[in-house]
Image: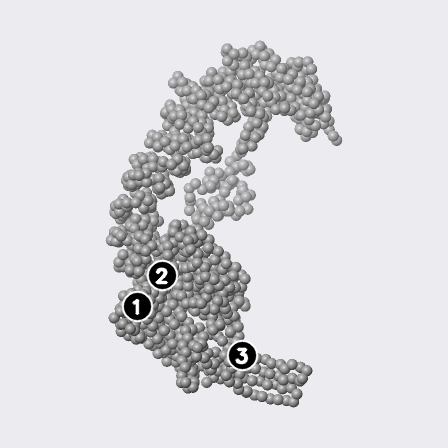
Amino acid sequence: MSSFNTNIFKSLINVSSVRELAPVVQQKETFVRERPITGEQGVSRSRRSGTGVSASLVLCTLGLCFSSRPYYVRYTLRCDMKRSLLAKDLSKTCEFMVHCLPQKAKLQPTPVDFNITPETLQNIRERSLLPKFLIRGHLDATNCVITQPLTGELVVQSSDVAIKSIELQLVRVETCGCAEGYARDATEIQNIQIAEGDVCHSLPIPIYMVFPRLFTCPTLETTNFKVEFEVNVVIVLHDDHLITENFPLKLCRV
Amino acid sequence: MAAVQWHSRVRRYVAEKQSCGLEVASVEFGDYHPLKSITVTDSKSRRGARKGSTSSSSSSSSSVAMDPLSCMMDGTDPLSMFAAASASEPHLTLPHSISSGRKEKEDEVAVDFEPWSSKRGEILARFTTTEKLSINLFMGSDKGKVAITVTGSQRELLNLSQQDYVNRIEELNQSLKEAWASDQKVKALKIVIQCSKLLSDTDVIQFYPSKFVLITDILDTFGRLVYERIWSMCSDPHPLPGTGSDEVNDTAKETCLNWFFKIASIRELIPRLYVEIALLKCNCFLTKCGIQKTLPRLTAMIRGIGDPLVAVYARAYLCRIGMEVAPHLKDSLNQNFFDLLETFRQIHGDSVQNQLVLQRVEIPVYLTLYSPAIHWILQCVSYRAPESLLTEMMERCKNLGNNALLLNSVMWAFRAEFIATRATDFIGMIKDCDEAGFPKHLLFGSLGRSLACADPPEAERLPILNEAWKVITKVRSSQDYINCAEIWVEFTCRHFTKREVNTVLSDIIKHMTPDRAFEEAYPQLQSVIRKILTYFHDFSVLFSMERFLPFMDMFQKDSVRVEVCRSIMEVFIKHQHEPTRDPVILNALLHVCKTMHDSVNALTLDDDKRSLALLINGFIRMVSFGRDFEQQLSFCVEARATFCNLEPVLVQLIHTVNQLAMETRRVMRGSHSRKTAAFVRACAAYSFITIPSLTSIFSRLNLYLLSGQVALANQCLSQADAFLKAAVSLLPEVPRSVSIEGKMRSSEGFLLDFINNFLSTLLVVPDHPEAGVLYLVRGLLNMVQDYTWEDNSDAKVQVYVSALPLLAAMSQETYLYCIPKVDSNETLYGGDPKFVAEINKLCETLIGQVLDHLKILGRDESVRRQSSLAFSLFGCLLAHGDLRNNKLNQLAVNLWNLSHKHGYCDTQTSVRTLEFIKHLAQQPNMLHISDMVQRLILQSRT
């Protein structure tokens, strides 16, 4: 699933250089709660008489919570040094990151066209009360390289009610298998406005979103744990109708 | 001391002059002489002879020895070299015209691109509001997520006046700089984001353009700060930014990338756009073609802005930054404009209309809000654009419905020549425009502005004017009308004759007179006058326009009217080279000058008076009736009546009249007929009654003297007498100190100068038959005696000493000079012994006075003054007294000794004087002098 990569320290450096903007970048910091460590695997243990050094890799995986709070996965390396009676034991903990191996296979672009009309909508009570509209568009790819922006176009062909705003909502969906079945948790990680106000009809508006570096990772699918991403095209009408079109994305690193 | 008997030395002026004069040596043609004409070789004359050059080589001999200066300069003097150099240089490219022959680097914006900074102020001044504004600064984080901000607070400032608003924005600008300086980059970014958020708010829409200007200033600051920071991070700063990203080190690149990631996550579209545009230049740190890739994307992103006004200003900002950062990338500029055309229909869409109703803004007012942005975009697009592109753009605009707004900007931004050649088409298009939309007078104004810079084809000019004026004259609001008419006056003046201009003027009068509308439009009306004056320098043509003076009558506010009159007079003085007698010009200008004169009151500043007088004098100097002297005199009479409040003008008039009298004398070759004699007397009379009205005492004195001399020259003896008498009787009134350039100075020096000048004139003034001998001289000396001189001053005695030479000259048989056809005392008395005795008596009195004064000085211990006074009297005796007389001789020796007694005498002068006396003594018949020399002791210090 993941492997240690020699690059980890480099990526740490990258993070530190981000510090310039850190307060803004780490918007979600307070949402992050350190999860209790659920599993501990001693990786190596060596003892000598008198003093001893123990190193442990702490894998805090699958911190799971059902109060719709996100997971936090972190890897730390901890080294304990037992010393003789008169000296205190020494201990050092170091957090590190895990890089996925870049995908070897060539990425196939998978463009998606979409049409949004009152008829295509689900989850509505009275279809007849809806204003008429027709919105076309396409995404250039749903198989996205994580370092490249998501691109596409959107055209408001017609709309009875003026449009208030068009937004792109990037959502992370984490699924975890547990005793009761599967737990699924979706979190908005970025919301970008691509149109404001009553945009000109039949003029293509670009869809463009850069994936935030700290909140996205390559899509991960294992038997009982998944991290997936979706993008929602959200159209807010002036009468506060909200129209959402959902596109699952597959992110990868090349 | 007993009275000294005076005897004047007999002078033979002719002989003296000959003996004094240097020998005249004729210089042979070709001989060397230092003062012979110097050949300045003019480099221009070689390249192509130009008349009026300073070359003087032609007349002088070619074999003249080389002038050492021109030898040094290798035949070309540096001034002419400069002149030649500047002449050969091509003219600078003017705005609106593009020199095709000149190749410039394409990625540089040259001087002919009107910079944003010049538009800035204009926009701020034009788009103002009296409504209350609000700033909503949401400085906290979004949607109640964690506040990490430094100043995390939501502030809404309501009910700000425009000035408050501007101040607030300036405060934000300052706090941005402070935050940056104190390394709070995040806070800085937040401020910028909040500011650009304000641009999505179109409340108080009339203020939007100004708001745009204010906020983009902040963005500019931010963009510059970020760029400089990343720039400074590059380890080895390379000379040209953007040349390549290879040299940019990883830290700089990473920082730059961080900024862009941060910006990419800004939720709202408009702040994200603006901030990214502000940082456009930083793209060059990432990849070589970073800017090239980003520009089209940003251009497309603007399509997402629904409000057309907000969108068009965002485009203007993008174009502006694009022009600054990468002027060679024209495609996105064009794309911006085409996108603008695509979204053009939105302006008339429902959401805009609803908003306007809500804010109670009229459509025409709303449309003019677009102008600055569209002007700017078009200016960027059309800059150095090929003709074909411009044509294409124009066609596109034409095909769009309701395109007046675009049309206006096209006319404003495209090259004037381009517009001018298609002027007729434009008029057609303007006519087709919807009446309810963009104001037509603005369209015609823009067209007129272009036509003022470039000329349409000759045949089309009159139809253009007719068509344009047909519309202009129908404009109802007088302010709109005059704004437009003012522009078109230039076109009319440029290409048409006075007839058309006259028609235009009468139309303006017709529009501006009702309800005294002109009162609101003085600047424009003044500009009309200025434009007419630039094109019509011939004042006879100008004033033969029937409506010109009625037009002038519209300036009813005093200050404005005077200003207009001033500008007319300035142009007249500058361009009128020939004197004129044209009654039309005279009448009109007299009226103009009278207006200026009448504006003078007790509160007028001296400087103003002076400049007004200067202008009026310039006019008076230009009036000449040729041989019709009487007419000229009567003009002066009229002018005197008209300009009685400005003294310099009166002085000028007196000079003019005196000149007139002398001119008459010249024409009559010195002998007046009965008629001309009467005329010159009239001139004298004019001066005589004008002079007393002057307040400056010295100008009165000098003018009396001058006019007296003129009268004398014209054989008006009694008039001359009257002038001189008046001058003499004025003397006691001379104050002890006069104000010169605001400072009080002693008048003594001026008075002495005047008296000396006066004395020299008195030589030729014949005595009045009924008055006593030398009554004028006596009168003058009496006045001098009675005058209250300054304490401790020798001025009185100095006058006495200087009167001696006059008296000596008067006792000669023939005088040093005389006036033709006027019999001086020499002829009247014919050297009568009684006359001479009278003179001598007078001299004796004078010398007695001087000697008395010398005594007093000796008592007062003012020996230095005594010494110099004694020496000057000695000089006078030596030059004018007959030293054969023993007593005089003895007096001279005594004076010499007195002046040397205390050693205050200037030794050098004494030595020279002594040498001169010795030289005299060697002349024949000068025994008495050589005797005297023996007795003169030089107290040399050596």
> In this view of the protein, which residue sits in the foreground, B375 or B851?
B375
Spatial CA distance of label 1 from label 3 is 48 Å
Q: Are marks 2 and 1 on the same chain?
A: no
Q: Chain of mark 1?
A: A
The disc at residue B311 is: 2
Q: Is residue B524 above or below residue B168?
A: above
- Name the residue that disc number 1 marks: A156
Q: Is residue A78 above or below residue B385?
A: below
- Label 2: state its secondary structure: helix
The residue located at (43%, 69%) in the rendering is B265
Q: Is residue B562 above or below residue B351?
A: above
- Name the residue that disc number 3 marks: A95
> In this view of the protein, which residue sits in the foreground, B35 or A26?
A26
Residue B544 located left or right of residue B871 = left
The residue located at (28%, 46%) in the rendering is B475
Spatial CA distance of label 2 from label 3 is 47 Å
Type of amino acid at the residue the image marks with label 3: Glu
Spatial CA distance of label 2 from label 1 is 17 Å
Q: Residue furthest right?
A: B942
Residue B456 located left or right of residue B564 = left
Q: Quadrant of the C terminus of chain B?
A: top right
Q: Residue B872 falls in which quadrant of the image?
A: top right
- Label 1: state its secondary structure: strand
Q: Quadrant of the N terminus of chain B?
A: top right
